[in-house]
Structures are given as structure tokens and as C-alpha cells.
Image (cartoon, rainbow, N blue to C red):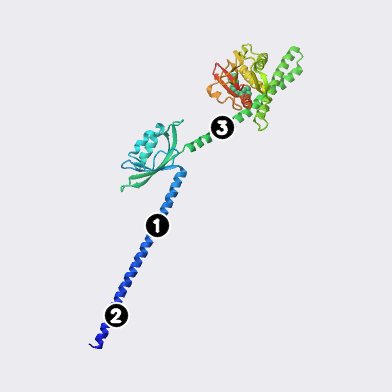
């Protein structure tokens, strides 16, 4: 064997070893690379999963906070699948399936049904891409329904573009509707108060000017008249107008006192016999009544010793106003003042008349400030409002029962 052969054999052996080493090294590197990629993709998957978990929790929180319930409608089958229901009155369990979405329609109030059904069907047919509707669902509450709204969009389509899946959210909006209603009420009340105040200003200038003109005018005439009986007639007219003006200012002062916080008239309670007060008021009314066609009567019943512990003056003011209204609005017949004990133990003190009466609609407003059924009738429309404030101060309850054209009964229920 030559030296050359020995050298080449050695070289071949080394080459093989190197080749093997390189092979092992390559395999090792490939394994390490594979491991690295695997680890990285696992890490990415975990990150993705935890991200999805967080966004699903967030999504859930948003639904819960907004009290929304989600649903998914498969257009071809009509199947509707519900997500969690966060409405106040949980209507569907999560994952609940309704075979045909049209089965829901009978629970919608008939007034809203056509609009809701039409809207949803337009969405299913692809006529619109999204929809938002407010509707009422039948319910076992005092209204007979709850307010709801839904928003839906086309989420998936067939290859021809027609909708295949619709997703939507539903919400109970009873609270929102209640707030809306309260705001509308408050706005209407503010508008009405504004209207009444304008009417009041117009009215007050008329109410003040009329007696004032009479006083000024007749006073001047009085100075030029010598005839005694004529002078007496003129003085009577002036006196009547003076009283009218005085009572007008009294009403206004009483009203502002009754309304001013902390300035309300003080209640001074002491015992008194009710029948005595009623008899006194009826005889005063008889004296001031100038209409012979109206008879003033007193009906005190059997319990003439009935004693109340209350503010006699304040109660008398209320009843005096009831009486003066009754006489003012009764052309003929009778005005009766009286009282009787009610089943609940309270005493009802009433003034009834056979006058023009008040419609049911007007009865609801009659105790409001400045409210008058007929603007041409004398008065500021403040008296009954003052009476109501006084009644509350006395711990009583005030009310009216009336039939248009037949007469009215105003009453105050007082604790014994
Ligand atoms: P005022 O202070 O001008 O007398 P009220 O507040 O007492 O006004 O009454 C308001 C309105 O209620 C009157 O303008 C009248 O239209 C109606 N009213 C009050 N009492 C009677 C009654 N006994 N019969 C018919 N209408 C009445």
C-alpha cells in the first residue's frame, strides 16, 4: 500500500466523520428551528385566546350595562337564536332557539305589530341594510305592555347578495319612556303656567281697572249731585267697587303668602263647635246674598256638638270662599252649607249649589292658580288655589263633585 493510498483512506474516513457531524448539526438546527416556531405559534395562540377572552368580557359588560339582549336570525330557516338577555324582564335564556321568528309577533301590541313585522321583513328581503324600531310588548302590568326597541343589521349574505343572517339587539326602554313622559309633562306644565301668568296679567289689569274706573268716575259724579237718594245710590256703587278692589288685593296677598316659603300663614289650632261656625257662616251669607231666587240653607245633621281642633279662621276663609262662589254661580235654587261624618272617621264639610256646574275636564284644573272656566267672569281664579293651600295646612283634603248644568259640591275633609 503506497503512502498516497494511506493518506487518501484517512481523508475519506475524516470526510465521512465530518459529513456525519454536519448532518447531525443540520438536524439539530432544524429541530431547534421547529421547536422555536412551535413555541412562537403557541404563544401567539395563547395571546389571541386571552385577547378574545378579554374582549368577550368587555362585550358582555357593555351588553349588561346597556341592558341589551342579542339575537341572531337565520333568514332561510327563520330560526332565531338568543344571546344572554340583560333586559329588566329576562325574556329569553341564553342559547334559546325559536324555530320561526314570526312566532314572536303575537306578543307585540296590535297597534305596533304591522310596523315591526314590515320592518323586519324588509330587512330579511334585503330592502334595507339596517333597522331600528320602538314597539310595545304585551305584559302583565298596569299598562298592559312594556316599551322595547330593537336594532338589527344584515350580518351575512348569500353569493347573490341576499341576506342570510341578521343580527340584532333588543332593549327594554320603559325607564327611558317614563323619563320622556315626565319631561313632556314638565314642559307642558311650564307652558301652561306661562300661559296662565300671561292670562293673569291681562286679567289683573282688567280686574283692577274696572272697579277703579267706577270709583274714580262715580266719585266725580257724586261731587256734582245734590239729590240725597241719588248720592246714596252712587255711594253704594262706590262702596261695592271698593270692596271688590279690596278683596282682589286680599286674594293676591293671601296667595303670595301661601306660596312664599317660610312665609305661610301660621296655623292656630284650638277647639270649637263646628255647628256654630257653620250656622254663623250661613247667616252671614244670607245677609250678603242679593239674589232672591237663591235660598241659603244650613244642614248640620244630628251631631250638633261635634268639636274640631283646628284653625277656625282658616277653615272659615275656605268655606266663605266656597259660599261666595256658590252664590256667584247659582242663578236660582239653593246653596247649602253643612257637614257629615264619613266612614273613615273624618268630617266632610261641604257647600253645594244648584248652579251652572263644572265639566269633568274643568274639575281637574279648578284648583290650579289663575284658572277660570270663563275668563269673562269676575275674579282672579286664585280663590280655590288659596283654599287648597289652606286645606293642606289644616291637614285636610279638598275636592269637588259637579255636574254641568246641575250644580256643584265643594268639600273639605277634616280629621276629627
Ligand atoms: P276666583 O278667585 O276668581 O273666585 P276661584 O279659584 O274661586 O276663582 O274659581 C275658579 C273658577 O272655578 C271660577 O272662575 C269658576 O269658573 C269655577 N267655579 C268655582 N266655584 C264654582 C261653582 N260653585 N260653580 C261653578 N263654577 C265654579
Callout 1: few (<14), some (14-19), or many (20+) C-alpha neighbours within 10 Å?
A: few
Q: Residue 235 appears at what percent x and percent y?
A: 73, 17
Query: In this figure, which residue is indicated by the disc labeled 1?
Result: 46
For the point 25% across and 83% down, the residue is 9
**149 relative position to 406: left or right:** left
Callout 2: few (<14), some (14-19), or many (20+) C-alpha neighbours within 10 Å?
A: few
Callout 3: few (<14), some (14-19), or many (20+) C-alpha neighbours within 10 Å?
A: few
Q: Residue 239 appears at what percent x and percent y?
A: 71, 18
Q: Are marks 3 and 1 in contact (CB under 8 Å)?
A: no
Query: In this figure, which residue is indicated by the disc labeled 3?
Result: 189
Mark 1 and ligand 1: say if the CB distance to the nearest ligand atom is below 8 Å: no
For the point 37% across and 33% down, the residue is 106
Mark 3 and ligand 1: say if the CB distance to the nearest ligand atom is below 8 Å: no
Is residue 375 in sight in this rendering? Answer: no
The earlier-in-sequence mark between 2 and 3 is: 2
The earlier-in-sequence mark between 2 and 1 is: 2
C-alpha distance separating marks 2 and 1: 47 Å
Q: Quadrant of ligand 1?
A: top right
C-alpha distance separating marks 3 and 1: 61 Å
Query: In this figure, which residue is indicated by the disc labeled 2?
Result: 14
Amino acid at each position: 500500500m503506497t503512502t498516497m493510498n494511506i493518506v487518501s483512506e484517512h481523508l475519506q474516513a475524516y470526510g465521512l466523520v465530518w459529513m456525519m457531524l454536519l448532518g447531525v448539526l443540520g438536524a439539530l438546527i432544524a429541530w431547534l428551528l421547529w421547536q422555536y416556531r412551535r413555541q412562537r405559534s403557541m404563544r401567539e395562540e395563547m395571546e389571541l385566546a386571552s385577547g378574545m377572552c378579554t374582549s368577550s368580557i368587555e362585550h358582555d359588560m357593555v351588553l349588561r350595562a346597556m341592558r341589551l339582549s342579542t339575537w341572531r336570525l337565520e333568514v332561510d330557516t327563520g330560526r332565531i337564536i338568543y344571546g344572554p338577555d340583560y333586559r329588566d324582564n329576562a325574556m329569553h335564556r341564553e342559547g334559546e332557539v325559536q324555530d320561526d321568528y314570526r312566532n314572536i309577533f303575537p306578543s307585540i301590541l296590535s297597534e305596533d305589530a304591522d310596523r315591526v313585522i314590515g320592518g323586519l321583513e324588509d330587512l330579511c328581503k334585503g330592502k334595507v341594510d339596517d333597522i331600528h324600531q320602538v314597539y310595545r310588548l304585551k305584559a302583565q302590568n298596569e299598562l298592559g305592555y312594556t316599551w322595547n326597541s330593537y336594532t338589527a343589521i344584515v350580518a351575512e349574505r348569500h353569493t347573490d347578495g341576499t341576506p342570510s343572517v341578521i343580527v340584532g339587539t333588543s332593549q327594554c326602554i320603559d325607564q327611558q319612556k317614563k323619563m320622556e313622559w315626565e319631561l313632556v309633562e314638565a314642559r307642558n306644565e311650564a307652558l301652561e303656567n306661562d300661559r296662565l301668568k300671561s292670562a293673569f296679567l291681562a286679567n289683573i289689569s282688567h280686574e283692577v281697572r274696572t272697579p277703579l274706573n267706577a270709583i274714580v268716575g262715580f266719585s266725580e259724579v257724586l261731587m256734582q249731585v245734590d239729590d240725597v237718594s241719588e248720592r246714596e245710590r252712587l255711594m253704594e256703587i262706590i262702596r261695592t267697587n271698593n270692596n271688590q278692589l279690596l278683596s282682589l288685593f286680599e286674594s293676591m296677598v293671601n296667595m303670595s303668602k301661601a306660596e312664599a316659603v317660610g312665609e305661610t300663614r301660621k296655623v292656630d289650632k284650638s277647639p270649637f263647635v263646628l255647628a256654630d261656625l257653620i250656622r254663623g257662616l250661613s247667616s252671614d251669607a244670607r245677609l250678603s246674598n242679593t239674589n232672591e231666587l237663591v235660598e241659603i240653607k244650613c244642614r248640620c245633621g244630628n251631631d250638633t256638638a261635634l268639636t274640631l281642633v283646628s284653625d277656625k279662621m282658616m277653615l272659615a276663609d275656605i268655606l266663605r270662599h266656597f259660599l261666595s262662589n256658590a252664590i256667584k254661580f247659582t242663578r236660582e235654587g239653593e246653596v247649602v252649607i253643612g257637614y257629615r261624618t264619613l266612614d273613615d272617621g273624618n268630617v266632610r264639610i261641604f257647600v253645594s249649589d244648584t248652579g251652572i256646574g263644572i265639566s269633568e275636564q274643568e274639575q281637574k284644573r279648578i284648583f290650579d292658580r289663575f284658572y277660570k272656566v270663563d275668563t269673562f267672569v269676575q275674579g282672579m281664579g286664585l280663590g280655590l288655589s288659596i283654599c287648597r293651600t289652606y286645606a293642606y295646612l289644616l291637614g285636610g283634603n279638598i275636592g269637588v263633585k259637579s255636574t254641568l248644568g246641575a250644580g256643584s259640591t265643594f268639600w273639605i275633609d277634616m280629621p276629627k
